[in-house]
Image (cartoon, rainbow, N blue to C red):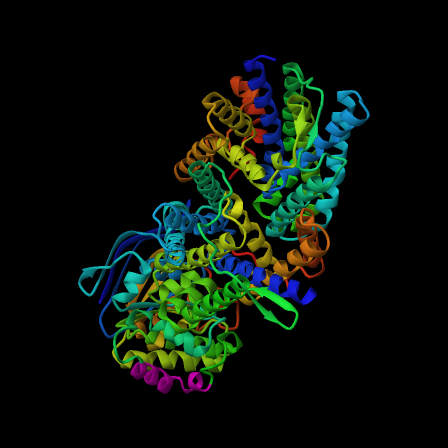
Amino acid sequence: MLKVENMHVSYGAVKALHGISVDVPAGKIVALVGANGAGKTSLLSAISGLVPYEGTVTYAGEPLPKRSHEIVAKGLVHVPEGRRIFANLTVYENLMAGAYTKWEKNGIQENLDRVYQLFPRLKDRASQYAGTLSGGERQMLAIGRALMSRPRMLLVDEPSLGLAPLLVSQVLDLIVQVNQQGVTILLVDQNARKSLQIADYAYVLQQGRIVKEGPGQELLNDEAVQIAYLGGRKKQSDNGADPPTGREDDC
Amino acid sequence: MSFYESVFVNVGIMIIIAQGVYVITGLTGLFSLGQSSFVAVGAYTAGFLATRFEMHPLLCILAGIVVSILVSFIIGIPSLRLRHVYFSLATIAYCYALQAILTVSETFGGSIGLVGVPVVTRWWHVVLGVVATVWIVRNFKLSRFGLACLSVRTDELAARTYGIQTFVSKQIAFSLASAISGLAGGLLAFNLGYLSPDMFTVPVSSEYLIMVFFGGLYSQTGAVLGAAALTVLMELLRTTAAWRMIAYSTIILIIILVRPNGLFGTWEFSLDSLNPRRRAKHGLAKGGEGV
Amino acid sequence: MFVQQLVNGISLGSMYALLAVGFAIVYNILGIVNFSHGATIALGAYCAYWLSTYLRLPLELSMVLSVTIAGLVSALIERITLHPLRRKGQPQIFFFIASLTVFNLVTAIIIYVSKANITSYPRTLIYGSIRMANVIVPKLDVLMLGIAVLSLLALSAVLYKTKIGLAIRCCSYDSRAAQLMGINPDLVIGTTFLLAGLLGGIGGALLGAKYAVYPELGDMVYRAFFACMVGGLGSLTGAIFGGLLIGLIETISNAYINAAISPAITFGLLVVILLVRPQGIAGKLVEDKI
């Protein structure tokens, strides 16, 4: 579905990605795991056209356009981290903004119903300003908003950031549900264990390079990954929560 | 006074005005659309004292500078605490208000203006003024106040967290800019011999700003050379004011689009740059300014 | 007498409100102080004058056409000058200077073409006045107020009922997130400038009918700027209130004090209001966009 080959991204003199290749097969969930500043968000931003990059990205067999709105029109939608909803708009208007590219076509109502079915909470709050929503609701709105354009693939950035532990599982379960409806997913989340559990395949990023890849379950059992990103199984009592490698300043 | 001398004097006065704009806008990053009013304060004070009390021109000009500084506190203290946009707004308001006051005031000749100011400005007066201004501004820029202003321009909040008194720095820069404008106003009054309120409008201030932009907003050298080049060019064209403005604006627009940092960017001329050994020694002072 | 001045003030204020709202929608979306708005104000008056005088078109038609031209010129200005700056991600300073320069350029062209004369439309837009009790209101003032109200209603219909309006509001809040919705920012910003230009054109054309047609009409942009700040930068309702306030202060100080000193009083009072209430009348303090 999406194939990233040899992608380089730099911010001025700082290089964030050093030639990354990622392959996301249709209908699957692929996760990116890594410490802060490893380049996960840079990768998503580059794919969705927010950040310029070098390298090639093919999507559904064609080269991906470079400008954000053209990319969305192709059915590839980036769900930014939860706080980037339009707080000055109502929940309903936020959802309609998500349907921007599908405005002329029929079926907006149908889409809306589907989103409301997935997130009943949003229906209750439809006429409220999005700025009044709680963290979890905002995240639901961000995902629901993206679904309004009937995407074929979602890039989901940190859906569980800042959420209570109970909500984290809920939100990631929702992502599985979305996936089961036929939407391919590239997921970045700070909760590495949970995202590896739901992922079909995963890549481990470290300082802008891919250091490991494999099926989600396999990485979950990999000792190095465990120590670095899952809090370690054997050394949990020590300072295992601190990843010993792969840390650098946020770009 | 010959044609060339009059061009020379005009150029000199414009360079001085440009130095004032450089201090407040280029160095400190504040957009003043009221610089023409400070020129007006200097000019009217000097002109008034010269016509009414027949004081010596030098004293008149000094008085103009002092009044300009006083006014800069009246405007600056309330407006410099607020955000940048408010400052621009306050200077616009001040410019309109001063113009209205000058227009109605009988003392200053109303809308006809002040006439009969002795025309005594000669080329060496202007040379003195330019040299003094450039020297003062250069030293100000390299002083700790100048660095404080630079930090305000780059990131005011960060500057404050480093303990820089941003308000004080802005007020000092604003007062210095006003003093320089006041000096230019005094020279202008004794050069033209008459003054009227419509010589000091907001659009005139915007022309000053644009003039400095031509040479490069962030370069003192650029401000001097930009002002000189544009003024000479416009004097030589000697066409109508409207044509001049069209040419002027078009040149600036092209520069913004092609070379946004002005002709000189952040480059500064210095005698040291001619001498490689001293250049190394003063490397910090020279390269200290980024965009 | 006082009631009459009040009506005059509201009518004039409604024009300022139009100009201020045009100024505010651009500020909201780009976070820039758009002085080139002044160019559209002057063009609104001058195009109506040129079309009705030299092409002998009916005045009403000329005004409609000139408003259209003002809108298109506004979008064109954005395309030619601000768009390249935005592309390169230049700092605010350059937008400030560029919009100021464009404003100066258009004013200079108008001065050159019109020989800097103060003129007026070939005929009065509307004669007569309406008399209620002992208040006499010129019909022109009523017409201006009516057009202003209609224009603002039309604008709010565009902003709240259409797709592009939704996109404008999204971009005003977070333009990068709006791009991720598939919204083309160039289109949205162009449309915003078009709308602002239309509002500026309407204001300019009508102010030309009320006073005279003169090149400095564009300087009204500074009043628009003030109205926005006093109303609360970022708020369209605030801009309307600010415009009305300026119109009232100006009319009343004109009538009771002195026409020549009225700018000093108006601007002085506004600065005082801002000192007391820096966030403006409409409320919340909006942070600078970076």
**Residue C65 figure quarter:** bottom left
Image quadrant in which the C terminus of chain A is located: bottom left
- C128 within the magenta span: no
Image quadrant in which the N terminus of chain A is located: bottom left
Q: Nearer the viewer, residue C173 or B79?
A: B79
Residue C283 in sight from this viewpoint: no
Residue A103 in sight from this viewpoint: yes
- A113 within the magenta span: yes
What secondary structure predominates along the stretch shown in magenta?
Answer: helix
Q: Position of residue C81 (x, y in %)?
A: 40, 45
Q: Nearer the viewer, residue B213 or A239?
A: B213
All told, the count of numbered labels is 0
Q: Is residue B182 above or below residue C46?
A: above
Q: Position of residue A136 (x, y in %)?
A: 47, 78
**Residue B11 figure quarter:** top right
Q: Is residue A248 above or below residue A28?
A: above
The residue at 48%/53% (across/down) is C204
- What residue range appears in magenta? A109-124
Q: Position of residue C92 (x, y in %)?
A: 50, 48
Q: Nearer the viewer, residue A223 or B129?
A: B129
Question: Viewed as shown, does residue A165 lie left or right of A174?
Answer: right
